[in-house]
Amino acid sequence: MVKRGRAWSMLPLYLAFSNNQEVSGLSEKQADDILTEENPEKLNEDGTEMNAEQTEQAHRSEQDETIENEATSQENGDSLAALEAEKEELNQRYLRLQADFENFKRRTREEKARDRQFRAMDLITNLLPVLDNFERALGSAAEHEESKALKQGLEMVYRQLTEALKQEGVTKIEAEGQPFDPNKHQAVMQVESDEHESNVVVEVLQAGYELNGRVIRPSMVKVSQ
């Protein structure tokens, strides 16, 4: 009975603050503190004291709300962890794609560079027999003045042709006196030689050529036994 009387005695103060009215110069916080201290029991919205069933129901509601808040927090935490994992996966995928793209660009540059180096291979291969004929003609002896003049003209054309091929990356394979290299030399004959050690190129029958380090025609050679 004392508690109920105390609650009813504080009802005007509670109702007054519910209607935003000033009471005896107290602030709203001070009045709330008084209500909390004087009336620890829960009150209904109309100011009446809750019975046991209402109190239990309010308590269950608070528990349910607490459980719901905890579940929501757990769900939010799981969602955040899932988003972080997805972000990391997307970041790794982006890094792999970027690395693949850089490799693609590098391979493209290398392929273009190779294409530039060997773009004239077919033309140069077709010109090699012309060089052979020039060398045979220049290797013959000129007995008459007309032959000498013609030979000088051939030498000039030959120098111009070899210089143009050199600018494209064409070089003659050095073979005579070198150890036999199956990657650069094609042995067509083996001969005995007292002047050379075994497996050495004794004579070049047809010159070989490289284009930017790639053999486009091996040298035809004689090799010592």
Image (spheres, rainbow, N blue to C red):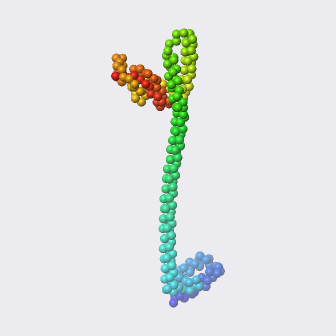
**Residue 24 showing in the rendered view:** no
Q: Position of residue 7 (x, y in %)?
A: 55, 85
Residue drawn at x 48%, y 74% is 67
Q: Is residue 215 above or below residue 146?
A: below
Residue drawn at x 51%, y 17% is 138
Q: Is residue 203 above or below residue 62?
A: above
Residue drawn at x 52%, y 44% is 104
Residue nearest the viewer, comparing 32 with 185: 185
Residue at the top extreme of this rendering: 144
Left or right: where 83 falls relative to 222: right
Residue at the bottom extreme of this rendering: 1
* Quarter of the picture holding the C terminus: top left
State which quadrant residue 224 falls in: top left
How many numbered marks, from 0 up? Answer: 0
Residue nearest the viewer, comparing 129 with 169: 129
State which quadrant residue 12 falls in: bottom right
Residue drawn at x 45%, y 23% is 206
Residue nearest the viewer, comparing 196 with 18: 196
Left or right: where 14 falls relative to 58: right
**Residue 101 showing in the rendered view:** yes
Q: Position of residue 114 (x, y in %)?
A: 52, 36
Q: Position of residue 103 (x, y in %)?
A: 50, 44
Q: Position of residue 58 (x, y in %)?
A: 51, 81
